[in-house]
């Protein structure tokens, strides 16, 4: 038997990934550990973990059988269903990595600028190395000044002080 599942963002209860597995509990642990996950999915999960959150795994369908092909067809049907309803799944090529409030970077390249909408959150998916650097900066700043800051404080400061000239070379 195979399980079709979705990983849901706990911040807004939005499905972000559709998957297929023969062992849901083990696959969930693999996702949390970054094993057999794409960089985009892993980065999203790491962002959630940095906020003290984890994705929610929800079973969509159980598929009987000993071969994977019928389950793959059902997985594809669920992905099609979600995308057709406007969901932006991370395991679909071309889905935005950053969305809602600004520039959208897709797997396949840059997309047009979108104007901000204040009521929507802005997901941000730094690499594990970038997260470590942000943490190191916050730790060093705290050691030098005695003032506690976090990743968000650093990113907000960078955004506030950024101008078009500082984007040269991107």
Image (cartoon, rainbow, N blue to C red):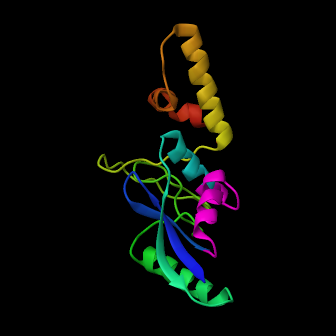
In-front residue for pair 35/170: 35
Residue 40 visible in the picture: no
User: x, y percentage for residue 164?
Assistant: 52, 35
Residue 91: image x %, image y %? 58, 67
Which x, y percent locates residue 9?
A: 44, 56
Residue at the extreme top: 145
Residue at left offset 62%, top offset 90%: 65
Name the quadrant containing residue 134.
top right
Tell me the chief SS of the magenta region: helix
What residue is at 66 percent from the left and 54 percent from the top? Answer: 34
Magenta stretch containing residue 36, yes or no?
yes
* Left or right for 83, reference 4: left
The magenta span reads 21-41
- 104 or 91, nearer to the observer: 91
In the rendered image, residue 28, in percent from the top left (x then y), is placed at 59, 61
In reply to whether residue 80 is colored magenta, the answer given is no
In which quadrant of the rendered image does the N terminus lie?
A: bottom right
When the figure is inspected, residue 124 is found, relative to residue 132, above or below; the finding is: below
Residue furthest left in the image: 119
* The quadrant where residue 73 appears: bottom right
User: Is residue 150 at all visible to an observer of this figure?
Assistant: yes
């Amino acid at each position: 038997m195979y399980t079709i599942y979705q990983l849901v963002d706990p911040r807004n209860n939005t499905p972000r990934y559709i998957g297929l597995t023969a062992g849901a509990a083990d696959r969930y642990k693999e996702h949390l550990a970054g094993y057999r996950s794409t960089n985009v999915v892993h980065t999203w999960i790491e962002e959630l973990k940095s906020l003290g959150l984890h994705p929610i795994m929800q079973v969509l369908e159980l598929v009987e059988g000993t071969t994977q092909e019928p389950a793959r067809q059902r997985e594809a049907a669920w992905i099609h269903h979600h995308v057709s309803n406007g969901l932006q799944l991370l395991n679909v090529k071309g889905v935005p990595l950053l969305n809602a409030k600004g520039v959208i970077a897709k797997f396949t390249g840059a997309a047009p600028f979108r104007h901000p909408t204040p009521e929507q959150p802005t997901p941000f998916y730094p690499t594990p190395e970038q997260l470590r650097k942000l943490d190191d900066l916050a730790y060093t700043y705290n050691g030098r000044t005695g003032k506690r800051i976090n990743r968000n404080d650093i990113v907000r400061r960078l955004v506030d002080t950024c101008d078009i000239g500082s984007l040269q070379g991107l």
